[in-house]
Image (spheres, rainbow, N blue to C red):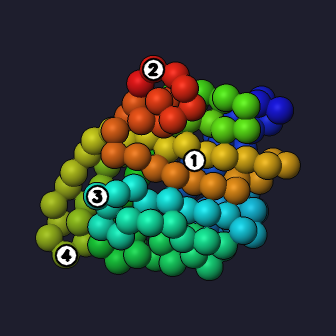
Amino acid sequence: MSRKNLQVAEAFYSAWARGDHSGLMVLLDPEVEYVNPDGAIEPGVRKGLDGYIAAVEKLQEGWASWRMYPERFVPVRDKVAVVYRYEAQARSSGVAIEGRESALVTLREAKIVRYEWFHEPGDALIAVGLEG
């Protein structure tokens, strides 16, 4: 199962990189939970495809571009911890930023049921019981 979960997580980041929103949607469970951490501009949980779409639209309001470059995928049971580098450009000011974060992708029956991102690159690994 972890191999299939890994493939789905990789496909998710690949679709995001291509700007393929319909490709993203087929990977998400209709009841998906999208989780912003404490300290995010809008912390909390968004539920369902509409909640996911709203979160992405909010991201696009503030950022002219947001690119993620996965560095490491670590499958653990029904989850995949992802460490990635990001580059973004603010929509209003044009300021460019970059950094590293992580995400925890939870899957069921080859669909993403929860996407939770973290401010620190090691936090997703810690969340699955591995060292960050």
Mark 3 crowd level (few <14, some 14–19, many ≥20, 10 Å Cα): few
Above or below: residue 45 compared with residue 54:
above
Which quarter of the picture shows residue 64? bottom left
Rendering coords of residue 6 (x, y %): 70, 35
Which quarter of the picture shows residue 25? bottom right
**Cβ–Cβ below 8 Å for labels 3 and 2?**
no
Rendering coords of residue 79 (x, y %): 66, 38
Tell me: 109 left or right of 102: right
What is the three-letter code of the residue carrying label 3? Answer: Gly
Mark 2 crowd level (few <14, some 14–19, many ≥20, 10 Å Cα): few
Q: Which residue is mark 3?
A: 39
Between the C-alphas of marks 2 and 4, the distance is 38 Å
Q: Earlier along the polypeptide chain: callout 2 or callout 1?
A: 1
What is the three-letter code of the residue carrying label 1? Answer: Tyr
Q: Residue at x 70, y 56 (%)?
A: 113
Confirm whether residue 85 shows in the render: no
Between the C-alphas of marks 1 and 3, the distance is 23 Å
Tell me: 117 left or right of 100: right
Q: Secondary structure at mark 4?
A: loop
Q: Earlier along the polypeptide chain: callout 1 or callout 3?
A: 1
Q: Residue at x 51, y 35 (%)?
A: 127
Q: Which residue is mark 2?
A: 131
**Cβ–Cβ below 8 Å for labels 1 and 3?**
no
Q: Which residue is mark 1?
A: 13
Quadrant of the snapshot with the N terminus: top right
Above or below: residue 120 compared with residue 50:
above
Tell me: 93 left or right of 71: left
